[in-house]
Amino acid sequence: MDRHDNVFLSDTAETYDFSSTPKPGGELQIPFRTNRQSHSDKLVAQFREAQNHFNSYTPEQVAAISYNTGTYVEFVGAENCDLVTKSLEDNRQGIKL
């Protein structure tokens, strides 16, 4: 088999004006957060409270509501705003929404 040198191109770049188009249905309505850290701390506290509440259940209560392993949490978004949940999933760590 013959050996070929690499091909090097020069002065081939072209610039195009581009902007992404919004998905059908318009742009997402996401609430503005003045203090994201405070919001994050509140969510962590609420999640811990939910875990503690679940851990206080008797084995009979758990058996009555749990048909899959894991913890079930209900998320509620701000009124008239979209709730973006896809970024909360992490299949590598087994987090599914």
Image: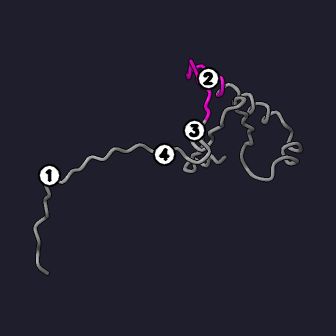
Which of discs 2 and 1 lies nearer the camera? The answer is 1
CA distance for labels 4 and 1: 29 Å
Q: Residue at x 82, y 33 (%)?
A: 56
Which mark sits nearer the N-terminus, 4 or 3? 4
- In magenta, the rendered stretch is 29-43
Residue corresponding to mark 2 = 39
Classify mark 1: residues with Cα within 10 Å, few (<14), some (14-19) or many (20+).
few
| Image location (x, y in percent) of residue 41 | 61, 23
Query: Does the magenta-highlighted stretch encompass residue 31?
Result: yes
Which of discs 2 and 4 lies nearer the camera? The answer is 4
Left or right, 57 with reference to 70: right
Mark 4 vs 1: CB contact within 8 A: no
| Image location (x, y in percent) of residue 4 | 11, 71
Residue corresponding to mark 4 = 21
Q: Amino acid at mark 4?
A: Thr
Q: Amino acid at mark 1?
A: Asp
Q: Residue at x 72, y 29 (%)?
A: 79
Vertical arrangement, residue 8 with respect to residue 31, above or below: below
Which mark sits nearer the N-terminus, 4 or 1? 1
Q: Amino acid at mark 2?
A: His
Q: Residue at x 85, y 48 (%)?
A: 63
Secondary structure at numbered mark 3: loop
Residue corresponding to mark 3 = 27
Mark 1 vs 3: CB contact within 8 A: no
| Image location (x, y in percent) of residue 21 | 48, 45
CA distance for labels 1 and 3: 38 Å
Secondary structure at numbered mark 2: helix
